[in-house]
Image (tube, grey):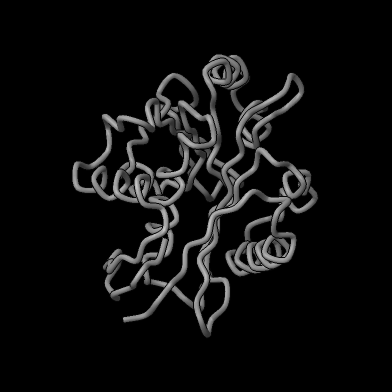
Amino acid sequence: METVNILAFRAPERPDLVATFLKEHELVLTELNIPLMVKGDTEWTTDPNCYVIVALHQTEGMVGGLRFQVDHGPGSKLPMSQAISKLDPSIVPLLQGLKQGGNGEVCGLWSANRFANRGVAVLLSTAVTAIAPYTGANSMVCFVGAHTKRHPEKNGFIAIKNIGEDGAFNYPTSEFRSIAMVNPDPVLLPFADPKQRQVIYSLRLRPDQTRGECPASDPVGGEV
């Protein structure tokens, strides 16, 4: 059994880990031949309302990560808004409505190819759902590749069907299909898989714990 440490922190608190996050994320996008469309977007690195979650392996280093950006202030814009507004302008008022009650976006999810098929994305998706209420978010959104939507679905996300084609868009290129999703209640998690809901509640009550997990075909022990 391998050990993966899952660590959550506000972006400005760990510039060292943020720098590694940026480097590894860029490497993954390059390997997938996806344009570095957000390479210049680094404002989140100094935003105290942006939470970063990373997966750290003893020998492989940082093998995965994501960020959770809480919508705040009159001028803030979530990455989803910037990505989708040119394709469907109705995303703007939709996100503005969610913002009133406290909303955050799960974005920048990546996992290293050198650590493929270990289920890192599952661990990260679980962890971010667990911490969401502590950030003041009463809803969560994400814009994910169609091939990875099963991860947010297990954690209570559903497609935003009143935009795009039932929430789906060709993005970031015509070869990729992405889906806009929302978790309307990350506290009670009415749409989450029942077993996954219990895991999230456990992590929420005791965030510092060691768990034995098999999130993919290879066993992975996750410390959260």
> Where does residue 188 sit, x and y in percent of width and height?
30, 30
Q: Residue furthest bottom?
A: 59
Which residue is rendered at x = 40% and y = 24% of the image?
161
Residue 60 in the image: above or below residue 135 = below
Q: In which quarter of the image is residue 87?
A: top right
Q: In which quarter of the image is the C terminus?
A: bottom left
Residue 24 in the image: above or below residue 200 = below
> Where does residue 156 sit, x and y in percent of width and height?
33, 36
Which residue is rendered at x = 30% and y = 33% of the image?
189
Q: Which of 202 and 74 is in front in this view?
A: 202
Q: Quadrant of the N terminus?
A: bottom left
Which residue is rendered at x = 64% and y = 48% of the image?
10
Q: How many numbered marks are there?
A: 0
Residue 150 in the image: above or below residue 71 = below
Q: Residue furthest left?
A: 194
> Where does residue 146 sit, x and y in percent of width and height?
42, 46
Which residue is rendered at x = 60% and y = 34% of the image?
70
> Where does residue 55 sit, x and y in percent of width and height?
50, 66
Residue 31 in the image: above or below residue 135 = below
* Residue 39 falls left or right of residue 128: right
* Residue 154 falls left or right of residue 9: left
